[in-house]
Amino acid sequence: LAERPHFSGPTDAYVGELVVAAGLERRGIATELMAAAEAWAAQHGYAFIALETGAANDPARKLYAALGFLEEEVRLTKAVRPG
C-alpha cells in the first residue's frame, strides 16, 4: 500500500500488487487482504483506494467488482519497434 495522486487531483491509497500464492486461490485470502487495505486507507484518512489489473484478468476484475470497485479509466498500450 502506498499513496498515489489521482488524475483528478486528490491523493488515493493505492494497492500496487495483490498476489495470492499458486494453489491458495479461492480461499478468501485476496478478500481479506483487500479488507485490510481498505481499513488502512480509512485509518489514514484517504477517501478512495485504487488499483490496476489486467484487462484480461477476469477473476481479479470480478473480485474487485464484488468488493465495490468501479472501473474508472482505460490504459492503452502499443508495442513500437526500436528505431
Image (cartoon, rainbow, N blue to C red):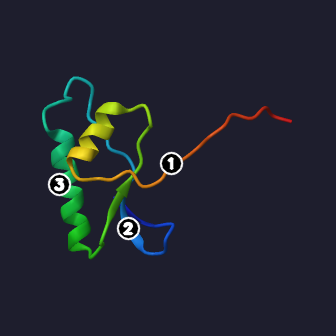
Q: Nearer the viewer, mark 2 or mark 1?
A: 1
The reply to whether dot 2 and dot 1 touch (C-beta < 8 Å) is no
Residue at x 47%, y 53% (from the top left corner): 73
- Quarter that holds the C terminus: top right
Q: Residues within 10 Å of mark 1 (few under 14, many from 20)?
A: few
Gap in Å between the C-alphas at discs 2 and 1? 18 Å
Q: Position of residue 47 (x, y in %)?
A: 30, 72
Residue at x 51%, y 66% (from the top left corner): 7
Judge by depth and name the residue closer to the eye, 8 or 80: 8
Q: Compared with residue 77, is residue 24 higher up or lower down, i.e. above or below?
A: above
Q: Which residue is mark 1?
A: 74
Q: Amino acid at mark 1?
A: Val
Q: Earlier in the sequence, mark 1 or mark 3?
A: 3
Q: Position of residue 49 (x, y in %)?
A: 32, 61
Q: Residues within 10 Å of mark 2 (few under 14, many from 20)?
A: many
Residue at x 33%, y 53% (from the top left corner): 70
Q: Which residue is mark 2?
A: 12
Gap in Å between the C-alphas at discs 1 and 3? 25 Å
Q: Position of residue 26 (x, y in %)?
A: 17, 30
- Quarter that holds the N terminus: bottom left
Residue at x 21%, y 45% (from the top left corner): 66
Q: Amino acid at mark 3?
A: Ala
